[in-house]
Image (spheres, rainbow, N blue to C red):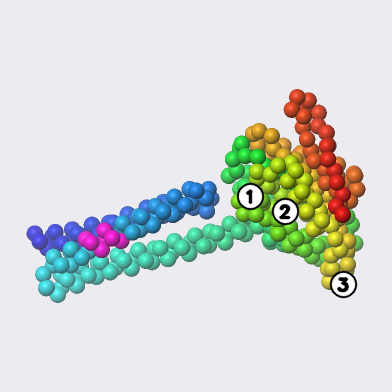
Amino acid sequence: MEEARNYMLTILSILIGVLTVYSTLRLTKDFSRQPQRTRAVRSSLVVLVISAGLGGMHLLGRRALTGFTTEGRSLLISLFLYMLTLAGILYLFLRVRMILGERDQLKELAYRDTLTGLLNKNGMDHFWDHCKLSEQLSVLYLDLNRFKSINDTLGHHTGDLLLEAVGTSLQQFTCKGKRHIFRVGGDEFVIIAKRCSRKESEQLALKVLERITRTYKLESHELFVSASVGVTISQGRIDPKQLLQEADSAMYSAKQLGSGRYAVYKQESRIPSVKLVSSSRAQ
């Protein structure tokens, strides 16, 4: 009976190990897609589950080992099962870490533009899927002036070099959790800023224009390139398609005002018509 009891303790220790691994996998499922607060809670739960699981396994395993007689075979079998379980858990955790790492790499490839390193359209779709519908957002739509003529005249290689340089310049405006930058077309970029007032949005537009509008040294070419920016701010419930259309419309209006300018799109609360209310030229 004593030997059967010890074997049951060993089997129970193994089941605890399996349950610990299963619970950890469930808690870490879609971990990177969760909000920061949820990730923090899940991380705490993972630590508790692993600690409790290993602690329970160690306690039961030790009781099973001490309960066995000194007969070499019984003691050896119990020790082997105990160590095998620990090795299995260690292997599974390493495997899970590798899988999660590969998934993060695939996510980067899926959500990142390979040329500029900025987020792409997939990354934007992921952003819209996870943003709060009532959150205040400012959307800036940026387009490079004369890019098509540069691309056609000097070739796609020079055009790619220019886009890469612009992407590098825009990277400095990225602010984790607050400001995201996307490349949505050939020479079109979108900046989405959270909790950004109209004044702050216009200041951001000016800073972007001042940074982008300059002379670029691209191998044997020196090109002066300017940009145009359209700005819109969400009012109430977020409609991604409408915000992008408004910012795009404001950007084309800014182009009509001249190079290196921005325009703000504003919709009156009681009047269905839309008017442009602000424009400025980058110095």
Q: Is residue 241 visible?
A: no
Determine whether 76 is above or below 32 in the image: below
**Where does the image place residue 18, in percent across and percent down from the top left?**
32, 57
- Answer whether residue 58 is magenta in the image: yes
Q: Is residue 51 visible?
A: yes
Residue at 35 percent of width and 55 percent of height: 49
Where residue 244 is drawn, which disc sits there? Answer: none
Main secondary structure of the magenta stretch = helix
Label 3 CA crowd tier, 10 Å (few <14, some 14–19, many 20+): few
As drawn, is 31 to the left or to the right of 158? left
Q: Secondary structure at mark 1?
A: loop
Q: Quadrant of the N terminus?
A: bottom left
Secondary element at tag 2: strand
> Which residue is farthest bottom?
72
Q: CA distance from mark 2 to mark 3?
A: 26 Å
Look at the picture and state if 152 lies above or below 278: below
Q: Residue at x 65, y 43 (%)?
A: 195
Residue at mark 2: 183
Q: Quadrant of the C terminus?
A: bottom right
Residue 155 occupies quadrant: bottom right
How far apart in space, not on screen, are marks 1 and 3 (Cα)? 38 Å
| In this rendering, the label closer to the viewer, 1 or 2 | 1
Name the kind of residue labelled 2 in the image: Arg
Q: Nearer the viewer, residue 247 or 68?
A: 247
Magenta span of residues? 54-60
Q: Residue at x 73, y 57 (%)?
A: 170
Residue 170 painted magenta: no
Q: Which residue is mark 3?
A: 220
| Label whose residue precedes the other's in the sequence (1 or 3) | 1
Q: Which residue is mark 1?
A: 178
- Residue furthest to the front in view is 199
